[in-house]
Image (cartoon, helix red, strand yellow):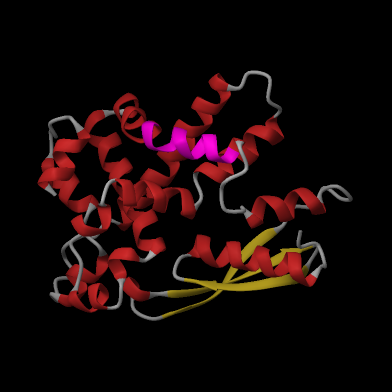
Amino acid sequence: MAALQERLGFAWHDESLFRLALTHGSFNYEQRRPEIESNQRLEFLGDAVLELIVSTYLYRTFPHYTEGELTRLRAALVCEPSLVRVARELNLGQCLLMGRGEEHSGGRERPSILADAVEALLGAVYLDQGLEQAGNFILPYLVPVLNDVLEGRLTRDYKTELQEILQQNASDPVTYVIIKEKGPDHEKIFTAAAVYQGREIGRGVGHSKKEAEQQAARLALINLGLNR
């Protein structure tokens, strides 16, 4: 954690935010201290901050891109694989406060946990340092990801791909519904359904809602014969 603080390059006004951002739900669950907060609320905030920072950066960097092109780029930058890449550059998995059970089951390398931790850390930086510093923190890690997107070297974003293909014939959106959650809070498994024009077209499972939705979109592409 000390190495991560040094790498961030600024002094925290409230160091408790830094610790909170790195506190996985399993840590408090295992210690039977439910009164201690985990990083879930900061993750919620960081998700919105990330979208704003990335949207602003893309808007200014690509003045001739259409709304659709900007949306595709943003989706590729804020998705789980991109955030996992950031987390691994920061060695974030090794900094997390985590229960032994979660750690022994590979939690420090689990993509959903790493992606959530990046968002939580970004939310903490935003609260402590403001929006500009939050952008200064996250953008240097995302610009290389952006370059990979532009050169076609990044993992596919199935949700955006499915939406674009279907909207060639109709403007109806694809929606995603979480139809099942199982397991304790720190080890939940989500099942998501992709719904289009009132019917389910794909169902996926993942350790996060985002992962489950991506898997639902991937299977929808297969079910509809659209997988490329």
The residue sitting at 35% across, 62% down in the picture is 113
Is 79 on the left-hand or right-hand side of 121?
right
Is 168 on the left-hand or right-hand side of 204?
right
- Depth order, front residue of 185/105: 105
The residue sitting at 18% across, 30% down in the picture is 9
Q: Identify the main secondary structure in magenta.
A: helix
Q: Position of residue 5 (x, y in %)?
A: 15, 40
Q: Is residue 147 magenta?
A: yes
Q: From the viewer's perspective, is residue 65 above or below residue 169? A: above
Q: Position of residue 149 (x, y in %)?
A: 58, 40
Question: Which stretch appears magenta?
Answer: 140-149
Q: How many marks?
A: 0
Q: Is residue 128 magenta?
A: no
Q: For residue 102, which quarter of the picture?
A: bottom left
Q: Position of residue 6 (x, y in %)?
A: 14, 37
Q: Position of residue 168 (x, y in %)?
A: 85, 47
- Depth order, front residue of 128/213: 213
Furthest residue in direction right, as rendered: 169
The residue sitting at 32% across, 41% down in the picture is 122
Q: From the viewer's perspective, is residue 105 above or below residue 19? A: below
* Quadrant containing the C terminus in the rendered view: bottom right
